[in-house]
Image (tube, rainbow, N blue to C red):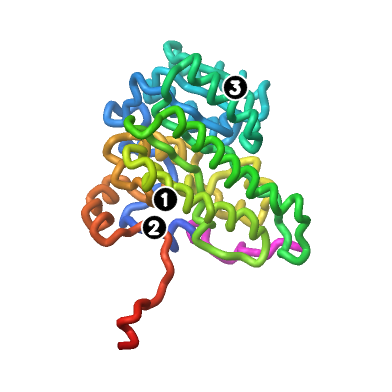
């Protein structure tokens, strides 16, 4: 089935339709510059999945710029992880890097990562679930079940298994952060490619559930921007909108792992939003319980009394 054309829409359509701050960005800016002392990750142990390419790789590089003490990079592609490692060392020769080829959809593979991290680096501080998949492009009736479900395997099961292992290492008494790379698409429905958007919606709910059971663990879900990646290349209908830089996504991930962003735990944000203006709305976000998924409508037995 041919892709539905979205070309008549302006390139910033998805930036503006989901705009929450007056100022929006499509590239990295000083407040999310990972080299900024305000965002320092000095001494922290960071785990990044999907670190062999694209957004995941850029996030790993950003944490090296933020002076992380130890970085664990994981993906299925061992040879590409070695390339990432060398780029990390060029940025920060002092960072300790652990390369762990991992299939995040495999419990045994993720358990191996957990055991290796524990033995080599101890208890981690930050997990970035950067591995993602968007494989199914048809309508539900025309979709291939194995392909449709593959998106859930990576986007939901993989993020769940990684979060599970991370939480087992962290426990209930330590402060830590989980950053889930999500998409604005979790807020929308489309006639095609439904598995990607529905699985990302589930990932958003996972982000909300974690801090309820682990109050000291902050968990956020964020839209990294519309970026030209290999995944985007496989979906030409979105390329018209892909004007955000990968550095925008990477800087936003480091920001979310910083103390000033912890009020967003259990919530969603977009990398396009200006974080200074977002912080200025902190009290409003908390008091009105904004940036969470909810059901629109008026409910309650009192409506019918």
Above-or-below relation of 227 to 89: below
Residue designated by label 1: 208
State yes or no: discs 2 and 1 in contact (Cβ < 8 Å): yes
Q: Quadrant of residue 262?
A: top left
Assign a secondary structure to mark 2. Answer: loop
Comes first in the chain, label 2 or label 3: 3
Quadrant where the C terminus sits is bottom left
Residue 229 position in % (x across, y down): 61, 41
Instruction: Kindly identify the residue that appears in the image at 35 percent across and 77 percent down.
Output: 300
Label placed on residue 100: 3
Disc 2 to disc 3, C-alpha distance: 33 Å
In magenta, the rendered stretch is 1-13
Front residue of this view, candidates 266 and 78:
266
Q: Residues within 10 Å of mark 1 (few under 14, many from 20)?
A: many
Residue at the extreme bottom of the image, as rendered: 305
Residue 66 position in % (x across, y down): 37, 25
Front residue of this view, candidates 263 and 55:
263
Front residue of this view, candidates 163 and 147:
163
Assign a secondary structure to mark 3. Answer: strand
Residue designated by label 2: 292
Disc 1 to disc 3, C-alpha distance: 28 Å
Residue 281 position in % (x across, y down): 24, 54
Instruction: Kindly identify the residue that appears in the image at 59 percent across and 53 percent down.
Output: 199
Comes first in the chain, label 1 or label 3: 3
Q: Quadrant of residue 106?
A: top right
What predominant SS class does the magenta segment belong to? loop
Disc 2 to disc 1, C-alpha distance: 8 Å
């Amino acid at each position: 089935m041919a892709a539905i054309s979205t070309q008549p829409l302006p390139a910033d359509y998805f930036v503006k339709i989901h705009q929450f701050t007056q100022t929006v960005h499509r590239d990295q800016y000083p407040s999310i510059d990972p080299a900024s002392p305000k965002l320092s990750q000095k001494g922290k142990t960071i785990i990044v999945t999907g670190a062999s390419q694209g957004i995941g790789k850029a996030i790993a590089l950003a944490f090296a710029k933020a002076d992380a003490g130890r970085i664990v990079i994981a993906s299925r592609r061992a040879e590409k992880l070695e390339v990432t490692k060398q780029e990390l060392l060029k940025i920060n020769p002092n960072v300790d890097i652990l390369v762990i080829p991992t299939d995040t959809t495999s419990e045994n593979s993720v358990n191996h990562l957990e055991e290796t991290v524990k033995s080599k680096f101890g208890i981690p501080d930050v997990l970035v679930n950067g591995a993602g998949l968007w494989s199914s492009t048809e309508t539900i009736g025309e979709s291939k079940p194995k392909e449709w479900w593959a998106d859930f395997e990576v986007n939901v099961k993989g993020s769940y298994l990684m979060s599970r292992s991370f939480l087992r290492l962290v426990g209930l008494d330590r402060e830590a952060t989980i950053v889930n790379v999500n998409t604005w698409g979790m807020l929308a429905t489309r006639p095609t490619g439904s598995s990607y958007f529905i699985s990302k919606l589930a990932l958003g709910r996972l982000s909300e559930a974690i801090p309820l059971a682990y109050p000291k663990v902050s968990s956020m879900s964020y839209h990294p921007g519309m970026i030209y990646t290999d995944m985007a290349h496989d979906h030409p209908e979105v390329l018209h909108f892909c004007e955000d830089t990968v550095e925008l996504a990477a800087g936003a991930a480091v920001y979310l792992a910083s103390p000033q962003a912890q009020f967003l735990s259990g919530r969603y944000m977009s990398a396009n939003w200006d974080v200074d203006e977002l912080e200025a709305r902190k009290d409003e976000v908390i008091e009105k319980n904004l940036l969470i998924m909810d059901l629109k409508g008026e409910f309650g037995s009192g409506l019918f009394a």
